[in-house]
Image (cartoon, rainbow, N blue to C red):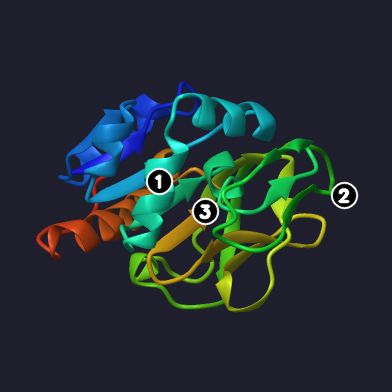
Amino acid sequence: MIAVADYGVGNLASVKKAFAAVGAEAELVADPDALARADAIVLPGVGNFGHCAREFRRRGLDAPLREAHQRDVPILGICVGMQLLFEGSEEDEGADGLGFFRGPVTKMRGTPRLPQIGWNSVRLRGRHPWLREVDDGDHFYFVHSFVPEAQGDIVLGTVEYGGERVAIAGNENVLGVQFHPEKSGANGLRLLRAFADSVDGGSLGGEAPRIR
């Protein structure tokens, strides 16, 4: 079961619909016990980092997600959900992230405008099984003003927006994407299909359709 963590924040219906479009079943999960039983977890998020972090913990979803991480359950963070994988954010310095990745989340500076809204191409900097159908230079849809300050091997993709910014970070069983794959047409669906394949034993096949 692919669980989309439901803590009242994020494009939950759009994420579920996107998985359905690639032939994968995803469930919105608000119960901590159900999240603990998930075969894979998607952590969405939009808006303010502090609000997302506090709501996630208030609803008791923090502990089962940490336990899932320790058991190498596949985890995909989207937008603010990606930022929550890091240690914290200057958007709300009183709210802690999950700390799966080292580094802070900071406000973008020297940009044409904020927030960055729209399509931009992603340069791949590393390999990951869930990026196997993503090509270097593919375009994805972004909506954000803050970005992780990640370094080293976890940086798997960058985007140019007033400088080079981290767009994808990950390791073997965790991936965070600053863009919205559920809003990124066929490119986003290919990424979600590869993630679902990691749970489904590679049973999904064919070409990723577009959401209409």
Check disc 1 and report the residue beneath it.
65
Answer yes or no: do the residues labelled 1 and 3 have beta carbons within 8 Å?
A: no
How would you rate the neighbour count of disc 2 (Cα within 10 Å): few for under 14, some for 14-19, many for 20 or more?
A: few
Can residue 196 be seen in this snapshot?
A: yes
| Mark 3 element type | strand
Give the labeled residue for mark 2: 109
| Disc nearest the viewer among 2 and 1 | 1
Q: Secondary structure at mark 1?
A: helix
Sequence-first tag of 1 and 3: 1
User: Viewer-proximal residue, 118 or 11?
Assistant: 11
161 or 130, which lies in front?
130
| Residue 173 placement (x, y as % from top left) | 38, 65
Most foreground residue, 18 or 154: 154
Upstream in sequence: badge 3 or badge 2: 2
- Quick one: label 3, few (<14), some, or many (20+) residues within 10 Å? many
Q: Is residue 31 left or right of residue 78?
A: left
What residue lies at 65% left-to-right and 63% top-to-bottom?
102
Picture disc at residue 177? 3
| Disc 3 and disc 2 in contact, CB within 8 angstroms | no
Residue at image location 51% in from the left, 55% down from the top: 176
Taking the spot 75% from the left edge, 55% from the top edge, the residue there is 161
**Of helix, strand and loop, which one carries label 2?**
loop
Amino acid type at image mark 1: Leu
Query: Given the image, on which type of amino acid does mark 2 rest?
Result: Arg
Count of marks overlaid on the render: 3
Asked if the residue at tag 1 contacts the one at tag 2, i.e. Cβ–Cβ closer than 8 Å, the answer is no
What is the three-letter code of the residue carrying label 3? Val
Instruction: Work out which quarter of the rendered image holds the C terminus and state it.
Output: top left
